[in-house]
Amino acid sequence: MKYFIVTFGCQMNVHDSEKIAGILEQKGYERASSKEEADIIVFNTCAIREGAEDRVFGNVGALKKMKKERPDLIIAVCGCMTQKEQTALEMKKKFPFVDIIIGTFNVVKLGEYIDKLKESRKKQVEVFEEGDIDELLPYKRTSGENAWVNIIQGCNNFCTYCIVPYVRGREKSREKEAILSEIKELVKSGKYKQITLLGQNVNSYGKDLKNPCSFAQLLSEICKIEGDFKVWFMTSHPKDLSDEVIDVIAKEDKILKDIHLPAQSGNNRILAKMNRKYTREDYLKIIKKIKRKIPSVRLTSDFIVGFPTETEEEFLDTYSLIEEVRFDSIFAFIYSKREGTVASKMDGQIDEETKRIRVNKLLDLEKKIQKEDNKK
């Protein structure tokens, strides 16, 4: 028996797919090199932007003919997109040939759904509202010399444009001992030269634990582990990036001097409407502190253009922020309306053409800055 996994979305989803692969290999499946030779095809989905959902629907729809020719082929759709109950029901209605439809929190039970399907030949559709961290699940790591290590799941920030808190749940930190034990095993294996810590907001790590441990303390503990490896992490929320974390990054040789700090906008009114809980001035203050303490730092960021009611002048504040900071790289996105979020109900939605013009201006600025810096 063979499996094939199609992954959409962020690094968290890539790591979730490693978990799915581990579950399937535990069930006796081997990795297939293509969909055509697979006995089970799993789509691990993303809900962060409309385009990602459209791609999922397109990819799943393309398997209708294959399923008709091979009735025993198992097709499963899981992850953030199907964590939204309405989308899961739409998937069930639109694609009756899909065998398993589950959300983010019940991916851990994929093996059980496969067994139930084989026993009953009945479609398995279920979406849990919340889930605990399972420390016993196997992983089939697929990212070369980099090993993803999840330290916290979920998010409590509720940025008005973001669906993540609704599909990933509230923040839940893993116990420090479990994280350190996993990293020690990874380093001991000799296969991994980089450990990348994952979380929707790694800076919030430890606040919910019975025995509190800050993210700065966790980083310090990881750096005490013997071995030849580097540490990186993503993603950071500016409002929670403490002086202690910056100091640890500056001090520890094992930590890559590479910080991804999403700004999203350079305008204070838009930042407030986004519920980001910091101002342009706050952000620049953090950046100056980072550059002073870590002169060799590589800075990257995320930006959203065309947020509801954003004027041209407010967009230019974002443009000028990028000019001032001179990021090594940016990820610029067109605002995508996500059903269920606060921003989706806001008046003043921006037309697509304006959004395209604005995002291209940011990407052109990024190229200009990179070209100038490369000449140096």
Image: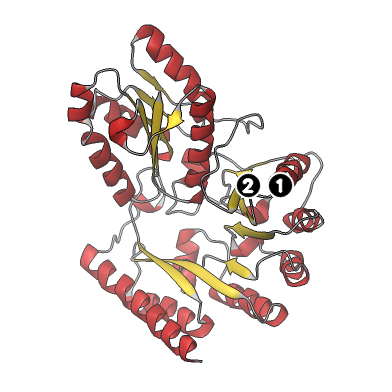
Q: Residue at x 72, y 78 (%)?
A: 293
- Residue found at x 31% / y 31%: 37
Using the rendered image of the protein, determine whether residue 157 is visible from the camera's viewpoint.
yes
Residue type, mark 2 in image:
Val
In depth, the one of 146 and 335 nearer the eye is: 146
Q: x and y percent of residue 231 in the render?
A: 67, 59
Answer left or right for 246 relative to 28: right
Q: Nearer the viewer, mark 1 or mark 2?
A: 1
State the mark number for residue 183.
Answer: 1
Dot 1 alpha-carbon crowd within 10 angstroms: few under 14, some 14 to 19, many 20 or more: many
Q: Residue at x 17, y 29 (%)?
A: 65
Quick check: 75 left or right of 277? left
Whole-percent x, y for residue 211 in the image: 82, 42
Callout 1: helix, strand or loop?
helix
Residue 8: where, in percent of width, then height?
39, 46
Q: What SS does tag 2 mark? A: strand
For residue 28, above or below residue 176: above
Q: Are marks 1 and 2 in contact (CB under 8 Å)?
A: yes
**Which quadrant holds the N terminus?**
top left
Residue found at the far top of this picture: 120
**Dot 2: few (<14), some (14–19), or many (≥20) neighbours within 10 Å?**
some
| Front in this rendered view, residue 272 or 54 | 54
Say which residue label 2 marks. 149
Query: Can residue 106 be seen from the camera position used here?
Result: no
Q: Is residue 121 above or below residue 131?
A: above
Quadrant in which residue 161 is drawn: bottom left
* Percent x, y of residue 343: 39, 53
